[in-house]
Image (spheres, helix red, strand yellow):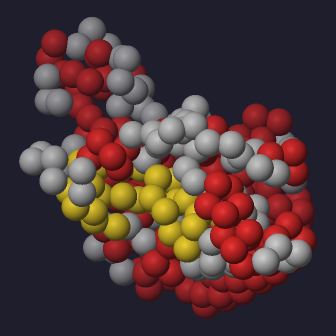
Amino acid sequence: MDAERLRVSSQRWMAAALAAFSQGSESYDFAVHHAGIAAEHLLKAFLVSLHPALVVEGKDFDSLLHATGQGAHASAPETKIKTIGLVEAHSRAYRILRNKIPVSQQDLLPLANARNGVAHSGLHEVTDVRTVFTTCLRLLDPLLVELNISPDTYWGRYQDLHDELIRERIRETSLRLQQKLAQARTTFEHRFGHLGPQERGVVLATVTRRPAWARDCIDKPCPACHSKAWVHGTTLVDKEGRFVRFTPGTFLCFACNLKVQGEELQELGDLGQETMLEKNIRSFLGPEPVVLELYEEDREPDEDFLAGR
């Protein structure tokens, strides 16, 4: 549970991962496996830098005793400490750093699955390697900032490869977002193009209202159809209850079916940025009256919104 040791370990595993990735598809299994370990160790380095207890399995009391400097009372040696895995380490760091980490838990799962697949069965999805690998790079970059680690030191001679993979991912994300926006505009026109301005306004006023089951969401204009849409996220209220820090998670427009989350949401600028709100907390978090939802038959279910039901 030493941050510096974990940092060094992460750097070594990442160097091995980048070397394997550079060798081509024959070594992709090593690449995703080693990258997953590098990510887990750097996440833990960040958590340990705040307090060693943050990487301990919460239900194991002996581990908590060692992490809090009370190891003399533990019935198991320090070498038997039980710590969290990659997914939980990401969850804890993500909650602390909030929107500084561009990789959501949903984005992380392919990396975790690939690492575990190689470790436990020697299997992984070859076609997803580049995406999985680049997800790891995007996850680690903000952690390097938090830990005051020079990127040149961490990435070493693979800095250029890192930069090119990141640029390629940004281009792919931007293209995917533009495709979604184009499809959403087509959907909107198909649904409402035949209506006059007054009739369209009446229908949209009903369609775009917040569902009764949706919580922790704010309304924003849709970048595709300009209708009122909803950004669902997580909230943190200050001690006085005057301000709400809102971190976006999923953007959903009921008028054109545009759904954006993760790195695509970051591409939408202000829609993907953390916001400080000063308003009545109950009205912000609480539901509105039940409204009739149109076009539900052809709408893709939204897991983040449904979770609040």
Percent position of residue 52, x then y = 26, 40
User: Residue furthest toward the left?
Assistant: 240
Q: Left of 226 or right of it: where is 131?
A: right
Q: Residue furthest top?
A: 75
In front: 70, or 258? 258
Q: Which of 196 and 254 lies nearest the eye of the viewer?
A: 196
**Percent x, y of residue 226:** 63, 78
At a point 38% along the width and 67% down the height, the residue shown is: 274
Q: Quadrant of residue 16?
A: bottom right
Quadrant of the snapshot with the C terminus:
top right
| Res. 82 visible in picture | yes
Residue 301 location (% of width, % of height): 75, 45
Side of 45 relative to 268 (left or right): left
Residue for point 48% across, 48% down = 90
**Image height check: is 22 above or below 1?**
below
In the rendered view of the protein, which quadrant contains the N terminus?
top left
Q: Position of residue 51 (x, y in %)?
A: 22, 44
- Image check: 218 left or right of 106? left
What residue is drawn where x is 60% and y is 87%?
Answer: 163
Q: How many marks?
A: 0
Seen in the picture, residue 10 relative to 52 is either above or below; the reply is: below
Residue 104 lies, with reference to residue 138, above or below; the image says above
Is residue 144 or residue 287 the one in the foreground?
Answer: 287
Left or right for 205, reference 246:
right
Residue located 28% across and 73% down the image? 148
- Residue 81 at least partly seen: no
Residue 229 lies in quadrant: bottom right
